[in-house]
Image: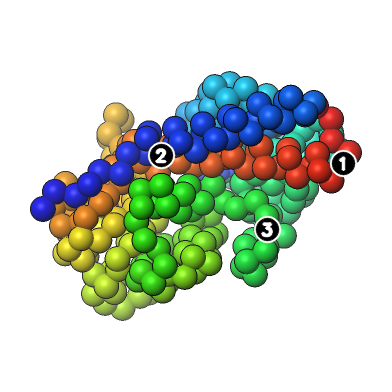
Amino acid sequence: MAARILSGKEFAAKIKEAAGRRAAALCAAGVHPRLAVIIVGADPASEVYVRNKRKACEELGILSDHIALPAETTKAELLACIDALNADAGVHGILVQLPLPAQIAASEEEILRRIDPRKDVDGFHPVNVGQLAIGAPGLRPCTPAGCIRMLEYAGIPIEGARAVIIGRSNIVGKPMAHLLLERNATVTICHSRTQNLAAVAREADILVAAVGRPRFVTADMVKPGATVIDVGINRIAPKQLVGDVDFDAAAEVAGAITPVPGGVGLLTVAMLMENVVQAAQAQMEQGGVEG
Ligand code: GUN
């Protein structure tokens, strides 16, 4: 059986189209949505991700500020930069690209907490994490939110489905579990200490791989007909990216599967655009925002 390939490009285009329409409506109302992206140092992968975010902003008529800080930036300097953006009513979204350089990596949580939760378009601030956990409105992390939107657009049922997530990160695994639960899936999170991982994974109607290990999910871990969402992006050679799923073999068993590249990564950027317009709209409605 050959699986349906869930093209990130196709679903990202739908998300961006809707975000672009909302951005235009905000502009017409006198508010020009604006994202500030802070990148510290010159991590090559981060530079590619940030470039893609800026390109998407340009495409949709969203303003973007690119703030490139030197690798040796101190925590105090980065916090001061965030404070200035928090105070700027013309900036609606703030994103600090991760990972941070070694001297400030240990302070990541403190740095992310400093972003005004209303401008936290990554959805990483504890306020937004808490809002998600209790099912209240807030900015949702882009990657898992993009995966959910893709399932909805693709007509893949979530309610009542057995969902298994491999990986328990704050960026993907945990928020993905909340988002699936919110939509009435039965959710299991697996991690490095999970016993009989393959057997648990094989129970999934929706299997999400977010472990950061190349081709970790093999065909024997996939239930025939399951939907497989591959969140991994692993560089195994200078010009070769692979996901966390052994794509060719898993595609023989799955009912639907996302490719890497060309899958979830594109959805992340698209959802970021949606979060920026959502943040701009909320700030406009609350007052104190400038276009
Ligand atoms: N680094 C890798 N993925 C992400 C993301 O979604 N947001 C931020 N800020 N940094 C990242």
Q: Is residue 280 visible?
A: yes
Instruction: Please give left or right for residue 197 compared with residue 120 in the image.
Output: left
| Distance from Cα at disc 3 to Cα at disc 1 | 18 Å
Mark before the other along the chain sequence, 2 or 3: 2
The residue carrying mark 3 is 137
Q: Secondary structure at mark 3?
A: loop
Give the residue type that dot 3 points to. Answer: Pro
Mark number for residue 287? 1
The residue carrying mark 2 is 11
Front-lying residue, 28 or 203: 28
Give the residue type that dot 1 points to. Answer: Gly
Q: Secondary structure at mark 2?
A: helix
Up the image or down, 120 lies above or below 266; here it is: below
Picture colour scheme: rainbow
Q: Is residue 269 visible?
A: no
Query: Farthest left residue?
Result: 1
Up the image or down, 77 lies above or below 171; here it is: above
At 13% across and 48% down in the image, what residue appears? 2
Quadrant location, the C terminus: top right
Mark before the other along the chain sequence, 3 or 1: 3
Q: Is mark 1 within 8 Å of ligand 1?
A: no
